Image: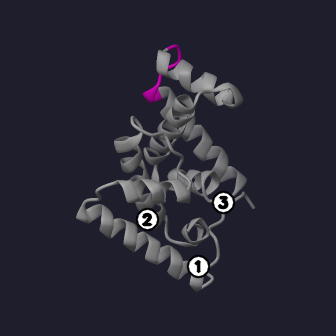
Amino acid sequence: MMDGLARASPQDRYDYYSFVAAIMDRHSLDRCVSASTSDVMKWIAASQLSDAETETLFRVMFNARKALGQNLPKAQVTPGEVKKAMLAMGAELDREYPIGTPLRTRYRNTALHLDQASADDICFVGQVGLHLVLALDPTSRDVMLLMGQLGVTPD
């Protein structure tokens, strides 16, 4: 799925990760899971999807499989695009979670000491990170989605 998403359109990537964020928001309080394909599929199995969510999921899965089957090239990012996107994400983090607030401290401590973090803290960082990425401008958002989950590296 992820290899196909790296070959699909930016809109398909946005739709997929918006869908994942919505499911994370519904389930993060009762079970913390990651945004990996296998965990997302477990969430989906345990969720009651709306008709719109079901349509989004199947459309994106079809488009990702189609792009993979057609052997379309993976989207590429440049170091300059990555730097711009990282700066934009940092600005969004500062806006949403100002320095000195308890949630920003939790985010920082977890991100810096992942090996010592609780499962809830790791889930919190993942959920916050996904929402920060989805709030970016379309170009920066796509760069971050490609870099974060899909394993695309700068040229």
Q: Residue at x 38, y 72 (%)?
A: 58
Give the residue pinned by disc 1. 68
Of 65 and 136, which appears nearest the observer? 65
Q: Residue at x 26, y 64 (%)?
A: 52
Give the residue pinned by disc 2. 11
Range covered by the magenta-colored residues? 95-100
Disc 3 packing (10 Å; few <14; some 14–19; many ≥20): some
Q: How many marks?
A: 3
Q: Nearer the viewer, mark 2 or mark 1?
A: 1
Is there CB contact under 8 Å for labels 3 and 1?
no
Q: CA distance from mark 2 to mark 1?
A: 16 Å
Q: Nearer the viewer, mark 2 or mark 3?
A: 2
Q: Nearer the viewer, mark 3 or mark 1?
A: 1
Callout 1: SS:
helix
Of 130 and 140, which appears nearest the observer? 130
Give the numbered dot on residue 27: none
